[in-house]
Amino acid sequence: MPRVSMKGVCDMHVHTNPDLRLRAYTDFELAEAAVRVGAKAIVIKTHLGFTVNRAALTNEYIRKVYGDNTGFTMYGGVVMNKVIGGVNPEAVEKGLKLGAKVIWLPTQSARRHLEAMGQDPSGGIELVRDGKVIPELTDVFHLVRDYDVTLGTAHVSPEEAFVIVEAARDAGVKKIVITHPEWWVVNMSVEDQIRLVKDYDVILERCYAQNMGGGKYKSNLPDNLEIIQTVGYKNVMVATDGGQTENPHWELAMEEYMQYLADHGIPLEQIDYMTKELPCRLLGID
């Protein structure tokens, strides 16, 4: 079987310390792992709002320790949870001015997330009202469009996703990623994923494993292979959603994911597209 290469890999969804939940790596440790394997970029994510400041500090650390020629850059983003006021255009704008590359809709504050966790969904952030997105979300879409960054759907429901994606496209957003649609909390059917790709040309982010609760994780790799074969590799982005202590360290999970695809007949050039070319394009880097 052909062996995959991690050189040039770009992962747009990794969790790190500091966090309220213990992660496997700190920002610095993750960056060091990325440098070791020749990765090009990682986007760190937190449910607590901003990571763009942390990414900037990590890049300064890497420059001081490893010099200017590692070829690796850490990026951050903004998650619109209640901790930053929910759908908060001002917070989003500040994050974008600081260099945020991904703006995510609510995760743990999403109504879908709360409902899946057995909590009252009415305590979550309202995104769609009377069949339309709330005005503040349209303002966020305009910012995402103007800064030409990526919109991630995070933990919204499939029903919300269709309304949101259409409104985002109407507002001129070019880069839309459906965040881990396979996760049981999101629970988006294959049919809905196919329809979103067909009607809106979105990117499906398919992740290494999913949290089933109680510290248990389920591999997504067989389902990921199937969706690539179903919708085509050009609309699938490989990501880990890694950083959990229960899963392999980031670089091991990414390599395992890539090698699994290679071992099951996905050509190396297609794997490189899903792990290198596509995420780099979404980040606006060469």
Image: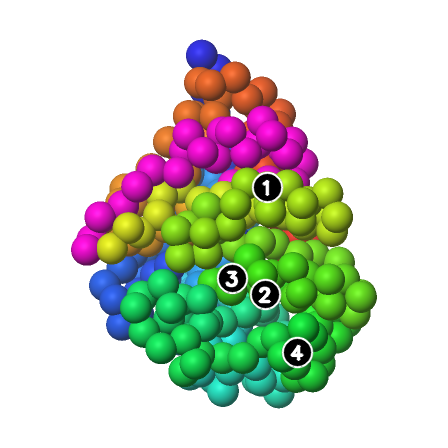
| Quadrant hosting residue 142 | bottom right
Foreground pick, 265 / 94? 265
Alpha carbon separation for disc pair 3 and 2: 5 Å
| Quadrant hosting residue 268 | top right
Foreground pick, 69 / 191? 191
Q: Is residue 272 visible in the rendered structure shown here?
A: no
Image height of 251 relative to 226, above or below: below
- Residue located 67% across and 73% down the image: 131
Q: Position of residue 48 (x, y in %)?
A: 40, 75
- Determine which of the numbered discs, if any, sits on residue 130 in the image: 4
* Residue 215 magenta: yes
Foreground pick, 275 / 6? 275
Which numbered disc, 4 or 3, marks the residue closer to the eye? 4
**Magenta residues, start to end:** 214-238
Alpha carbon separation for disc pair 1 and 2: 16 Å
The reply to whether dot 4 and dot 3 touch (C-beta < 8 Å) is: no
Q: Position of residue 273 (x, y in %)?
A: 63, 34
Q: Which kind of residue does numbered mark 3 sit on?
A: Ser
Among the two numbered marks 2 and 4 on one chain, the one whose residue lies closer to the N terminus: 4
Among the two numbered marks 4 and 3 on one chain, the one whose residue lies closer to the N terminus: 4
Among the two numbered marks 4 and 1 on one chain, the one whose residue lies closer to the N terminus: 4
Find disc 2 in the rendering and name its residue: 160
- Determine which of the numbered discs, if any, sits on residue 191 in the image: 1
Alpha carbon separation for disc pair 1 and 3: 14 Å
The quadrant of the image that shows the N terminus is top left
